[in-house]
Image (cartoon, grey):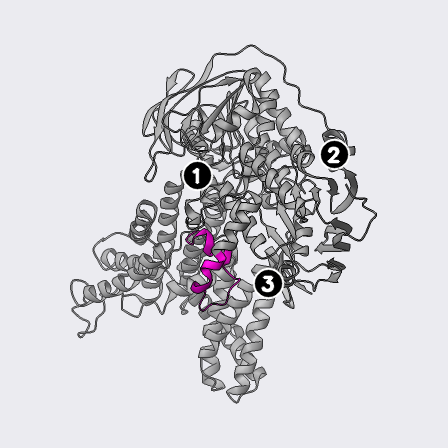
């Protein structure tokens, strides 16, 4: 381990980077050094300024103040091309690959002149093979990117950067879409990269990953660099407090006896285009229970949520609420049955952003008294209701008549929670309820879900965050390619086993070559 | 993503400004006069004499002012039709066809088929006209919600279908046998004629009905669950559907309201002003209604003001071209400039311009 005061191996130096967006200071005089052969974790909540900082580094944004030096040379601001030429490579959260091209084409794209590219492919192929060999990044160079798994696509992104001789690699939330196994493989690759002298900036808000992969941690909070720690000299708790700026209570899950069956699915299927979205899914959800649904995104969780929300009807099987089979699938009817729904995409589905808060809190109840009578809305009653939710759920906003789109993600989620919980629901469908929220808001959502569980509600919790699932769920099921595993009691769950199931192990007829 | 190196860029506003609602219309009017001034200079006239003539021609005398309100009447109806539909993101470009549907019902029922007194027959004609226009828009709306057929195309094309249909009627069953061979209908009987508001002038009861319609639309928007549904569906149909709002039914109801309002323009023009149906009943009132609605940022009370502004420009420009000799096209340019300015100004309610 090298001494960080030693400046000879500094490959990247950010000095006094400041970036303002209107009144918001996204980055406030941030300075940091990156050394050869280290993984530097950049930790911070959403909105702390991590991505802005990296976008400045890579030339997507121009800093208002401050300079960037790579290998002792000042980078011209606002030029991704210059950043690339100085050996800085970036793997974005959302991949930037051309789906219809092969892996090789994607890697080579932009590195060769437009003509006679074909003739150099042999050489490129050799170079790609060598890189993937050296760093343990197995990919089929002639496969179409569209046919690759998410983990494979990420490997292509990394290879793309390496092919361009990146000496500094920036990874923005690289594990957000990976299974635990894929995450482990990624970490092994990162280890190999730093052994060969690359320097890596690893952006994340997941504490255990930061602890596992980095040598140093830099914590950003509200645009400021608030702490720098050697990973070996800190722990998760310490980092969490630094990130949020105050102590974090862990959610407490009291054991509780199960209520009667609230929601049951029997052999539910849903046809999709080409392949079924749900296949033979059976599940029972009781009152006073949280059932967690694990799985890599896109394995049928969305279809399940759509059925329970009443957006689509299943093609086969039975959905029963409190013992009564549901015959008509319609959102209004599901709401009338006492199902609260926290949708996955709060901006696109959860609220109408251009309407005010008060208009949004009645979106599912505007036909009912006291909010309306004989087709006339009683805005006074609506405003009282909205004001109460804003107060009870601590929604930070200018007032009930402010446009909802102006709320932060956390406050928007609190508004949705307040709206849904106000009905004292007996069934709650929570689809990724904490995605993109900061730790404070996550804790609040967890508390509310546990409170509802205590009050007798059955909760179906769909999440990609295994930590969240394991803390909150009484039982966990895994979804893979439209199928659902039998439930596992929390006490019997092992993260490693869950990871294998998420990759398809143990699913009938789906033995996956992982 | 912000592109670097550009001298200016748009950034989303974090708060909504209120002053923009006053500044934007004023800027729109200012810009339209500025562009008109340049055109007047090119046309070889003094901008001030042009403006004076336009304003004088639109509001300088009682006659001129009443003429402006008369011209504004159909524009209020078609403006409301567009405002209602556009609020729910139902792109009704077919107000012209719906207007003619209302006009057809007026001559079918108003030329002697119903021998009833005025207070009875006029509401019946209005109801029939509203139904005809409403149903005319229901078809394209059903195709949109059921099959995803673009209503911009269907409603726009229906305008041409309707004009040809009217042409067929005027050379056939609705042709006035006493019309010396002209393609025109019989005249509406006295009982079915909307009374004049001022003796000896052209302004008629249709104007009052138009103001009433705007107030009704305002009430629907502000106070009823239907108004709430239209807003929610217009801004975010996915979220509306998720919440349990019957999106397709709301669309259908919106279509009925919008089509009905547009049809009233036709009823009012035939029964209040022209007295019979001809192929030149509407010089594009349906399309101008879209401009009116946009100038009014879809607000029903704003529609009244915007319709009077647009009507004043056209009426004033007519008078101006007679006295100053600058072509009336200047009115088109002024209205178009006002519209563009308004649309641009509305952009700044959501974004601010930053110079870097």
Residue, disc 1 = B241
In the picture, measured across the screen, residue A317 lies left or right of residue A56, that is left
**Relative vertical location of residue B71 with respect to residue A237 in this rendering, above or below:** below
Taking depth in this image into account, of B228 and A404 the one nearest to the observer is: A404
Q: Are marks 3 and 1 on the same chain?
A: yes
Taking depth in this image into account, of A419 and B308 the one nearest to the observer is: A419
Depth-wise, is mark 3 or mark 1 nearer the camera? 1
User: Which residue is at 19% across, 65% downward?
Assistant: B168
Taking depth in this image into account, of A44 and B312 the one nearest to the observer is: A44
Distance from Cα at disc 2 to Cα at disc 3 = 50 Å
Depth-wise, is mark 2 or mark 3 nearer the camera? 2
**Relative vertical location of residue A354 with respect to residue B281 in this rendering, above or below:** above
User: Which residue is at 34% across, 56% downward?
Assistant: B263
Question: Is residue A111 on the magenta stretch?
Answer: yes
Disc 1 is placed on an element classified as helix
Residue, disc 2 = A239
Residue, disc 3 = B24
Distance from Cα at disc 3 to Cα at disc 1 = 33 Å
| Residue occupying the far bottom of the picture | B44
The magenta segment is A99-124
Q: Are marks 2 and 3 on the same chain?
A: no
User: Label 1 near label 3: C-beta < 8 Å?
Assistant: no
């Amino acid at each position: 381990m090298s001494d960080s005061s030693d400046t000879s191996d500094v490959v990247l130096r950010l000095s006094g980077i400041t970036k303002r967006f209107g009144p918001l200071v996204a980055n406030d005089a941030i300075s940091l050094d990156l050394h050869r052969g280290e993984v530097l974790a950049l930790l911070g909540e959403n909105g702390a300024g991590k991505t802005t900082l990296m976008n400045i580094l890579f030339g997507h944004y121009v800093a208002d103040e401050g300079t960037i030096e790579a290998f002792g040379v000042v980078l011209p601001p606002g030029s991704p091309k210059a950043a690339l030429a100085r050996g800085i490579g970036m793997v974005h959260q959302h991949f930037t690959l051309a789906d219809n091209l092969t892996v090789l084409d994607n890697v080579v794209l932009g590195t060769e002149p437009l003509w006679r590219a074909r003739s150099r492919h042999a050489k490129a192929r050799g170079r790609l093979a060598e890189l993937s060999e050296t760093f343990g990044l197995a990919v089929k160079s002639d496969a179409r990117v569209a046919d690759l798994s998410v983990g494979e696509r990420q490997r292509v992104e990394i290879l793309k950067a390496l092919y361009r001789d990146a000496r500094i690699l920036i990874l923005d939330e690289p594990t957000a879409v990976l299974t635990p196994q894929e995450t482990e493989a990624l970490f092994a690759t990162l280890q190999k990269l730093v052994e060969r002298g690359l320097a890596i900036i690893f952006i994340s808000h997941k504490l255990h990953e930061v602890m596992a992969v980095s040598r140093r941690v830099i914590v950003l909070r509200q645009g400021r660099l608030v702490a720098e720690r050697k990973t070996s000299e800190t722990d998760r708790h310490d980092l969490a407090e630094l990130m949020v700026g105050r102590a974090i209570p862990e959610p407490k899950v009291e054991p509780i006896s199960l209520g009667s069956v609230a929601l049951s699915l029997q052999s539910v299927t849903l046809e999709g285009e080409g392949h079924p979205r749900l296949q033979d899914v059976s599940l029972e959800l009781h009152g006073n229970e949280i059932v967690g649904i694990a799985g890599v995104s896109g394995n049928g969780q969305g279809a399940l949520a759509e059925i329970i929300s009443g957006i689509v009807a299943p093609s086969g099987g039975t959905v029963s609420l409190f013992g009564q089979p549901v015959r008509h699938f319609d959102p209004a009817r599901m709401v009338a049955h006492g199902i609260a729904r926290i949708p996955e995409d709060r901006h696109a589905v959860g609220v109408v952003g251009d309407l005010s808060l008060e208009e949004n809190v009645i979106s599912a109840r505007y036909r009912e008294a006291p909010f309306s009578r004989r087709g006339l809305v009683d805005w006074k009653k609506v405003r009282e209701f909205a004001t109460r939710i804003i107060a009870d759920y601590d929604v930070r906003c200018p007032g009930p008549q402010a446009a909802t789109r102006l709320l932060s993600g956390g406050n928007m989620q609190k508004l949705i929670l307040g709206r849904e919980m106000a009905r004292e629901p007996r069934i709650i469908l929570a689809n990724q309820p904490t995605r993109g929220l900061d730790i404070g808001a996550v804790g609040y959502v967890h508390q509310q879900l546990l409170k509802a569980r205590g009050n007798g509600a059955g909760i179906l919790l769909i999440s990609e965050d295994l930590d969240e699932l394991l803390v909150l769920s009484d039982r966990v099921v895994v979804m893979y390619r439209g199928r659902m595993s039998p439930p596992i009691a929390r006490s019997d769950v092992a993260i490693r086993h869950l990871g294998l199931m998420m990759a398809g192990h143990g699913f009938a007829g789906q033995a996956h070559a992982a | 993503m912000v592109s670097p190196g550009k001298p200016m860029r748009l950034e989303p506003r974090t708060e909504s400004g209120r002053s923009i609602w006053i500044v934007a219309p004023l800027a729109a009017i200012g810009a339209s006069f500025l562009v008109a001034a340049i055109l007047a200079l090119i046309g070889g006239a003094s901008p001030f004499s042009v403006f004076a003539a336009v304003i004088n021609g639109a509001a300088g005398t009682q006659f001129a002012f009443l003429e402006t309100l008369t011209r504004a009447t159909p524009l209020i109806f078609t403006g409301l039709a567009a405002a209602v539909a556009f609020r729910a993101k139902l792109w009704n470009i077919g107000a012209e066809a719906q207007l003619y549907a209302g006009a057809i019902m007026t001559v079918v029922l108003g030329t002697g088929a119903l021998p009833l007194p005025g207070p009875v027959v006029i509401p019946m004609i209005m109801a029939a006209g509203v139904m005809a226009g409403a149903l005319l828009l229901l078809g394209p709306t059903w195709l949109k919600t059921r099959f995803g057929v673009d209503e911009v195309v269907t409603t726009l094309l229906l305008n041409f279908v309707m004009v040809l249909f009217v042409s067929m009627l005027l050379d056939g069953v609705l042709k006035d046998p006493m019309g010396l061979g002209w393609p025109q209908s019989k005249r509406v009987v006295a009982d079915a004629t909307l009374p004049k508001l001022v003796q000896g002038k052209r302004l008629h009861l249709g104007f009052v009905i138009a103001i009433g319609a705007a107030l009704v639309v305002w009430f629907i928007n502000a106070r009823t669950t239907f108004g709430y549904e239209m807003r929610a569906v217009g801004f975010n149909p996915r979220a509306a559907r998720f919440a349990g709002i019957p999106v397709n039914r709301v669309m259908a109801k919106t279509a009925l309201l919008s089509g009905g309002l547009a049809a009233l323009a036709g009823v009012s023009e035939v029964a209040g002003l022209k007295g019979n149906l001809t192929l030149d009943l509407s010089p594009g009132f349906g399309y101008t209604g879209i401009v009116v609605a946009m100038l009014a940022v879809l607000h029903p009370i704003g529609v009244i003001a915007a319709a009077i502004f647009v009507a004043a420009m056209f009426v004033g420009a007519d008078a101006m071209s007679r006295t100053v000799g600058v072509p009336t096209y200047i009115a088109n340019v002024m209205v178009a400039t006002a519209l563009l300015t308004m649309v641009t100004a509305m952009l700044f309610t959501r974004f601010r311009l930053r110079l870097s």
